[in-house]
């Protein structure tokens, strides 16, 4: 299909290495404009100067669900023509199908993307926290409906991330509803191009087929939204949008119980349904209101919340909506008379309070004023833009001023998060997204795989309000705690990726902040497929009765994956990891690495050289006497002694064997090796990378943190003299970077008593060195994925 002129312009800018801020009417093909450059490069220019991956960020899970279905089919058609496969996946809290961002095209919620960049990925355990940041750095980044990003956390975090990634990762920000002040300021701040460029180009949007043919009238009502209002104006297909879930549930009950609705299908859709039930509801809504639906027969009313503002490609004859900020009203109106040739009516009703739009009261008031003065008028894209400018102009300017004023403070929080401060990460991302809760009478039954339990998303404010009531007015029939917070046991820097969890009782609502999962007793909440999650109502639903059985990823949070290794030599392991680095993991990152080198002024290929050294030396700490003695002791204990003179990288271990688990408990703890290996290799790294100190720090950090993302201390170690031979033999895998290095320079022993923590700390990359930090993100991803792949290969062939 031929692209519209504005889509052609976007494609040209993106393929030329520019970044774009796009504003276009709802239903005008923004997603196609964003993905056309990536898909064309993926199939027609696979070796060109463009990222091999695309991460498409959305503010709501419903968007991710729809896009995967739509573009999965499109990708299949390209595959048939080009005989190349493009892997399309989804990564949300509800459907964590691409936890390590390994797909070619990943549709993800913005919290998943930002948390990954900040080394707090919601889809992975803490010990793997540095795995995904490199994927963000090396991808073409799309941010859809970014007007929905919260101005206090998600929006400034996204903007600061993009400032850090300038000239490294191309991006496009897209919206239908941002004021021109906001668009112009963002373009200047991010060095991006606004499309459309000026007022004349904006008016050309009216020539788009969707704009030429649709007719949409806006009406102001002085009455509060009620079932009677809806029924009075209903014909065949109506859509009702409420600001909060409780209101939507109440309106739906009124409609279902109304005698005039006996022949009308009433569907309730909001964010608090289990995936299976919500997917079925979304599909039913598409069947009734989608592009190919028969809207002239039968009768249906869909009652929903903000989940229908974006993503769902549906159209109703009549839209009833509670008053909200102008951008939300216009997004909702995009589901009325959406398709060519349709005529629709939008009715807007006053509300008693601004929830959930706290802080935007002035915007809501201006929206009401503008609509009242244009009651009954037909509005087009230019008119709608005028409404946005009127209602949001001053607010957007305040937001940008606030972002600029707090840039330093926000960056400090980002640096704290990158250093492992989970509370800081919560302020940057989770504060305004959602928190997951589950209903359980016996939450300990969920500990084996807690994130496989049925979960519901709540706005943190909603959860805080409910918890306040539950804690202040406890149920006298329940003896003991009724709210729990999931905690992850601190990782020990070892190789096993099994993660241990425990529940911490919540007796003060402040403990809810930043929690990845909250469990509440069935006396506090219930669930059913018609109404969804119901807070404050006792019920019979229990998560332990509905545990999911997906074990698709050994790195999933709470999976029942267990460690499995075979005795493998050091030399063989390094060879397999290096091969994986060359064949798979570096190819994903090389484009971003080249751009970062140009930006930082480093010699071409220097970042790859540093990454190769990190791969070659990552397990050097395992050559220590104490580590190798542990191998001998373990292999003897399990009845499989290691051969004389054998240098091991892995032992035999079967995590599913009760005997092996018991034997491991009896053994002394396996010595750590990651930071120790970085310290031992540091003289060689200094010699190879002395002209680029940031790359030395990035490589040192990648080695030290290839098992624990925030490891920083080391224990006393001693390398035997013969270890130099093992290092020399593995250095031959990359003769270029190692040609001037001599294993005799290794730091053969060290002791924290002798070497200060301050000195070791100075070798780690600093979060305030942006170029060094991005280099570390790329190296850490290349090394950790290669280590995963190489270890798996070693397990198969040993």
Image (tube, rainbow, N blue to C red):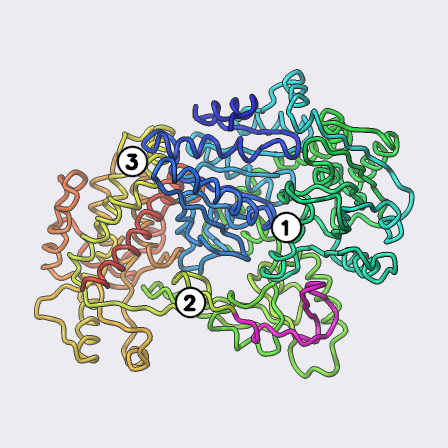
- In this rendering, would 793 be left or right of 756? left
Q: Which residue is mark 1?
A: 432
Q: Quadrant of residue 589?
A: top left
Measured from the top left, where is residue 391 in percent x and y?
77, 33
Q: Which residue is mark 3?
A: 692
Measured from the top left, where is residue 692 in percent x and y?
29, 35
Q: Residues within 10 Å of mark 2 (few under 14, many from 20)?
A: many
Q: Quadrant of residue 610?
A: top left
Q: Nearer the viewer, mark 3 or mark 1?
A: 1
- In this rendering, would 715 be left or right of 130? left
Relative height, residue 746 to residue 734 (above, below): below
**Which badge, 1 or 2, is on the more N-terminal residue?**
1
For the residues labelled 1 and 2, the Cα–Cα distance comes to 27 Å
- The reply to whether discs 3 and 2 touch (Cβ–Cβ < 8 Å) is no
Q: Which residue is mark 2?
A: 499
For the residues labelled 3 and 2, the Cα–Cα distance comes to 37 Å
Out of 52 and 726, give the one closest to the viewer. Answer: 52
Please, what secondary structure does the residue beneath circle 1 have?
Answer: loop
Question: In this picture, which residue range is highlighted in magenta?
Answer: 521-547
For the residues labelled 3 and 1, the Cα–Cα distance comes to 39 Å
- In this rendering, would 496 be left or right of 29? left
Q: Residue furthest right?
A: 222
Q: Nearer the viewer, mark 3 or mark 2?
A: 2
Q: Residues within 10 Å of mark 3 (few under 14, many from 20)?
A: some
Q: Is residue 68 magenta?
A: no
Relative height, residue 611 to residue 721 (above, below): above
**Which badge, 3 or 1, is on the more N-terminal residue?**
1
């Amino acid at each position: 299909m031929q692209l519209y002129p504005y889509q052609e312009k976007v494609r040209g800018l993106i393929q030329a290495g520019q970044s774009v801020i796009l504003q276009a009417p709802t239903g005008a093909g923004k997603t196609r404009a964003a993905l056309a450059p990536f898909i064309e490069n993926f199939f027609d220019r696979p070796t060109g100067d463009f990222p091999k991956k695309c991460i498409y960020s959305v503010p709501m899970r419903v968007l991710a669900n729809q896009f995967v279905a739509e573009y999965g089919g499109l990708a299949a058609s390209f595959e048939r023509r080009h005989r190349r496969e493009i892997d399309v996946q989804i990564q949300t809290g509800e459907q964590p199908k691409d936890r390590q961002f390994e797909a070619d095209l990943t549709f993800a919620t913005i919290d998943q993307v930002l948390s990954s960049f900040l080394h707090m990925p919601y889809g992975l355990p803490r010990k793997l926290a540095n795995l995904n940041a490199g994927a963000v750095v090396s991808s073409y980044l799309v941010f859809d409906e970014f007007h929905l990003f919260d101005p206090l956390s998600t929006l400034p975090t996204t903007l600061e991330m993009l400032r850090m990634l300038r000239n490294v990762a191309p991006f496009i920000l897209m919206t239908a509803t941002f004021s021109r002040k906001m668009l112009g300021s963002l373009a200047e701040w991010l060095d991006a191009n606004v499309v459309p460029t000026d007022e004349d180009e904006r008016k050309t949007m009216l020539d788009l087929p969707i704009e030429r043919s649709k007719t949409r009238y806006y009406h102001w009502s002085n009455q509060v939204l009620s079932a009677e209002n809806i029924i009075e104006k209903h014909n065949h297909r109506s859509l009702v949008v409420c600001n909060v879930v409780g209101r939507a549930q109440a309106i739906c009950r009124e409609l279902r119980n109304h005698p005039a609705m006996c022949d009308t299908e009433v569907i309730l859709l909001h964010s608090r349904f289990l995936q299976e039930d919500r997917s079925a509801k979304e599909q039913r809504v598409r069947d009734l209101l989608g592009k190919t639906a028969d809207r002239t027969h039968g009768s249906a009313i869909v009652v929903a919340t903000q989940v229908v503002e974006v993503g769902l490609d549906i159209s109703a004859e009549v839209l009833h909506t509670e008053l909200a900020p102008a951008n939300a009203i216009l997004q909702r109106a995009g589901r009325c008379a959406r398709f060519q040739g349709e005529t629709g009516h939008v009715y807007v009703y006053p509300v008693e309070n601004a929830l959930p739009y706290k802080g935007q009261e002035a915007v809501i008031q201006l929206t009401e004023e503008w609509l009242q003065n244009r009651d009954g008028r037909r509005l087009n894209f230019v008119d709608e833009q005028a409404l946005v400018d009127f209602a949001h102009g001053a607010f957007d300017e305040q937001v940008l001023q606030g972002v600029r004023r707090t840039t330093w403070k926000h960056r400090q929080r980002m640096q704290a998060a990158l250093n492992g401060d989970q509370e800081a990460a919560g302020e940057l991302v989770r504060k305004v997204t959602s928190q997951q809760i589950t209903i359980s009478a016996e939450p300990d039954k969920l500990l084996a795989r807690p994130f496989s339990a049925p979960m519901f998303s709540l706005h943190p404010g909603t959860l805080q309000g409910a918890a306040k009531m539950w804690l202040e007015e406890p149920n006298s029939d329940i003896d003991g705690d009724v709210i729990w917070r999931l905690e992850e046991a601190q990782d020990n820097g070892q190789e096993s990726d099994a993660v241990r969890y425990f529940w911490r009782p919540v007796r003060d609502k402040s403990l809810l902040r930043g929690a990845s999962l909250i469990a509440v007793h069935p006396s506090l909440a219930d669930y059913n497929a018609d109404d969804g999650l119901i807070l404050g109502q006792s019920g019979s639903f229990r998560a332990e009765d509905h545990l999911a059985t997906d074990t698709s990823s050994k790195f999933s949070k709470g999976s029942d994956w267990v460690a499995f290794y075979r005795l493998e030599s050091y030399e063989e392991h390094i060879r397999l990891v290096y091969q994986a680095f060359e064949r798979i993991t570096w190819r994903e990152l090389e484009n971003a690495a080249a751009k970062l080198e140009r930006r930082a002024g480093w010699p071409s290929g220097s970042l790859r050289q540093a990454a190769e050294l990190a791969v070659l030396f990552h397990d050097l700490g395992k050559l220590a006497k104490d580590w190798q003695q542990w191998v001998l002791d373990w292999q003897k204990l399990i009845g499989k002694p290691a051969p004389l003179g054998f240098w091991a990288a892995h032992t035999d271990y079967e995590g599913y064997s009760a005997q092996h688990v018991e034997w491991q408990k009896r053994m002394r703890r396996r010595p750590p090796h990651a930071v120790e290996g970085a310290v031992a290799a540091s003289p060689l790294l200094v010699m190879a990378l002395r002209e680029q100190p940031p790359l030395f720090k990035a490589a040192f950090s990648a080695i030290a943190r290839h098992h624990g993302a925030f490891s920083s201390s080391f224990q006393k170690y001693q390398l035997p003299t013969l270890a130099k031979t093992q290092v020399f033999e593995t250095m031959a895998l990359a003769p270029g970077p190692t040609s001037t290095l001599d294993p005799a320079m290794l730091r053969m022993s060290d002791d924290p008593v002798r070497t200060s923590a301050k000195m070791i700390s100075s070798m780690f990359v600093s979060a305030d060195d942006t170029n060094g930090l991005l280099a570390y993100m790329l190296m850490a991803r290349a090394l950790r994925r290669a280590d995963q792949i190489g270890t798996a290969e070693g397990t198969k062939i040993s």
